[in-house]
C-alpha cells in the first residue's frame, strides 16, 4: 500500500514506492517541513515522532493504490510527485534485500534452514537481516526468484508489485515523475 507524504506548507503530496528512493524522499519531505533529523533513520523517526511531524505540517497516509485517485480529488490544489526506477534495477534491488520475504511466503523450508544457519553463526549476525538474505539468495538464485514471482504473482508484496500499478499511473495525474537514476547524480 503506497505511503503518501503530505507536506502541507507546499501543498505537496509525494507518493513513495518501495525500493525507489523512498527513504531519501521521506527525509527530503521532512526537511521541507522544517524538520532536520540529521543522520537518524527516517522511517523510525516518522513512526515515533508522528505527532511532532504533524504539528509541522508533515502527514503520512497509507492509501491503497486503487484509492489514490480519490485521495487526489480530495486535494485538488496539491502537486503530486513520485520517483520511478528502472524496473530491472528495482527487481535486482528487491531480490537482494527482500528475498527473505519471498522465501518465508513461498519456500518456507529454505527460510527456516537459512535462519537456523544464521542462528548457529552466533550473536554477531543475529540482528543482521542482510546476512540472512545472502544465505537465502545462495539457495534461491535470481532466475528462480523471477520464475517464482511469475508463478505466484506480484500483488502479495509492494516491493515486487509493478510501479505502474503501485503508483496508479494512468489513473492519477502526477505533476512530476522523477527518475531515481537522476536523484543522486549531483550529490
Image (cartoon, rainbow, N blue to C red):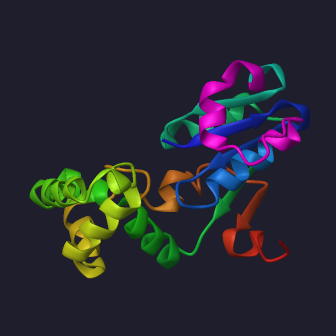
Taking the spot 65% from the left edge, 47% from the top edge, the residue there is 15
Q: Is residue 86 above or below residue 57?
A: below
* Residue 130 in picture, x, y percent from top left: 40, 61
Q: Is residue 28 above or below residue 154?
A: above
Taking the spot 32% from the left edge, 50% from the top edge, the residue there is 123
Taking the spot 62% from the left edge, 26% from the top edge, the residue there is 48
Residue 47 lies in the magenta-colored region? yes
Q: Is residue 37 left or right of residue 133?
A: right
* Residue 162 in picture, x, y percent from top left: 45, 62
Taking the spot 79% from the left edge, 49% from the top edge, the residue there is 28
Q: Is residue 140 left or right of residue 182?
A: left
Viewer-proximal residue, 109 or 28? 109
* Residue 132 in picture, x, y percent from top left: 30, 60
Determine which quarter of the picture holds residue 78.
top right
Q: Is residue 79 visible?
A: no
Determine which quarter of the picture holds residue 40.
top right
Viewer-proximal residue, 89 or 109? 109
| Residue range (magenta) | 30-53
Viewer-proximal residue, 59 or 177? 59
Residue 169 lies in the magenta-colored region? no
Amino acid at each position: 500500500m503506497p505511503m503518501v507524504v503530505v507536506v502541507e506548507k507546499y501543498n505537496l503530496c509525494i507518493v513513495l514506492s518501495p525500493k525507489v528512493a523512498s527513504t531519501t524522499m521521506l527525509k527530503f519531505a521532512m526537511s521541507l517541513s522544517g524538520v532536520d533529523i540529521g543522520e537518524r533513520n527516517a522511517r523510525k523517526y516518522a513512526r515515533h515522532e508522528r505527532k511532532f511531524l504533524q504539528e509541522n505540517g508533515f502527514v503520512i497516509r497509507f492509501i491503497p493504490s486503487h484509492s489514490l485517485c480519490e485521495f487526489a480529488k480530495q486535494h485538488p490544489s496539491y502537486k503530486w510527485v513520485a520517483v520511478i526506477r528502472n524496473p530491472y534495477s528495482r527487481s535486482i534491488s528487491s531480490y537482494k534485500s527482500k528475498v527473505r520475504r519471498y522465501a518465508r511466503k513461498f519456500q518456507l523450508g529454505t527460510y527456516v534452514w537459512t535462519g537456523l544457519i544464521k542462528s548457529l553463526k552466533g550473536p554477531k549476525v543475529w540482528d543482521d537481516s542482510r546476512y540472512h538474505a545472502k544465505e537465502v539468495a545462495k539457495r534461491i538464485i535470481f532466475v528462480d526468484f523471477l520464475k517464482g514471482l511469475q508463478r505466484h504473482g506480484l500483488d502479495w508484496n509492494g516491493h515486487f508489485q509493478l510501479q505502474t500499478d503501485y503508483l496508479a499511473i494512468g489513473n492519477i495525474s502526477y505533476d512530476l515523475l522523477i527518475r531515481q537514476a537522476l536523484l543522486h547524480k549531483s550529490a
